[in-house]
């Protein structure tokens, strides 16, 4: 099972804005995010994805292509320039990136039946999940 990571969609107004930003890199074939530290568990990330957090919820994922040094003492996270929608689940904001085990990753929206939770506000969804109702 591949290892994934999470990252805040900083500066994106919504999922459509994030999608536009990623797709702007389609001609290059990849989008690159800069990080100071290279993940120690790179070998486990083959086949993994970067899950995007927006308004305290995971909203989508971008498959990870790989990692490389950028020549300025930092590293690039290379991802496919597309946003795959996933079932929205609450996730606290954090700085940088964090690992996400495959067992805890939300399923893609096209692989699950719609149940309305993706139309709920992240706060309401979080409260319902705490109560065990969803």
Image (tube, helix red, strand yellow):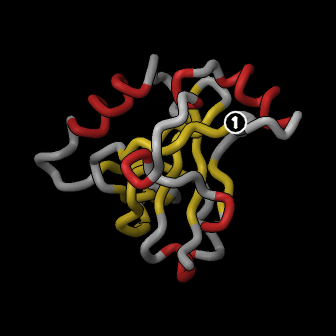
Q: Is the residue 24 above or below the residue 39 in the image?
A: above
| Residue 99 in view in this figure | no
Q: Is the residue 121 above or below the residue 60 in the image?
A: above
Residue holding disc 1: 90
Question: Tag 1: Cα neighbours inside 10 Å, few (<14), some, or many (≥20)?
Answer: many
Picture coordinates of residue 87, whole percent (x, y):
53, 42
Quarter of the figure that contains the N terminus: bottom right
Quarter of the figure that contains the C terminus: top right
Picture coordinates of residue 85, whole percent (x, y):
41, 42
Q: Is residue 126 left or right of residue 5?
A: right
Picture coordinates of residue 63, whole percent (x, y):
39, 59
Between residues 88 and 52, which one lies in front from this camera angle?
A: 88
Callout 1 secondary element? strand
Q: Is residue 83 left or right of residue 131?
A: left
Between residues 80 and 134, which one lies in front from this camera angle?
A: 134
Taking the spot 73% from the left edge, 21% from the top edge, the residue there is 123
Between residues 7 and 89, which one lies in front from this camera angle?
A: 89
| Residue 29 in view in this figure | yes
Taking the spot 60% from the left edge, 21% from the top edge, the residue there is 120
Q: Quadrant of residue 56?
A: top right
Between residues 61 and 107, which one lies in front from this camera angle?
A: 107
Taking the spot 21% from the left edge, 43% from the top edge, the residue there is 25
């Amino acid at each position: 099972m591949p290892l994934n990571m999470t990252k805040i969609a900083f500066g994106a107004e919504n999922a459509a804005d994030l999608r536009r930003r990623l797709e702007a890199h389609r001609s290059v074939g990849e989008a690159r995010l800069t990080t100071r530290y290279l993940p120690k568990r790179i070998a486990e990330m083959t086949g993994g994805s970067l899950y995007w957090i927006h308004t305290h919820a995971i909203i989508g994922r971008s498959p990870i292509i790989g990692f490389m040094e950028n020549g300025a003492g930092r590293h690039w996270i290379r991802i496919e320039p597309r946003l795959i929608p996933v079932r929205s689940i609450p996730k606290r904001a954090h700085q940088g990136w964090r690992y996400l085990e495959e067992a805890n990753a939300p399923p893609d929206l096209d692989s699950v039946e719609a149940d309305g939770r993706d139309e709920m506000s992240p706060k309401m969804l979080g409260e319902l999940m705490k109560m065990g109702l969803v």
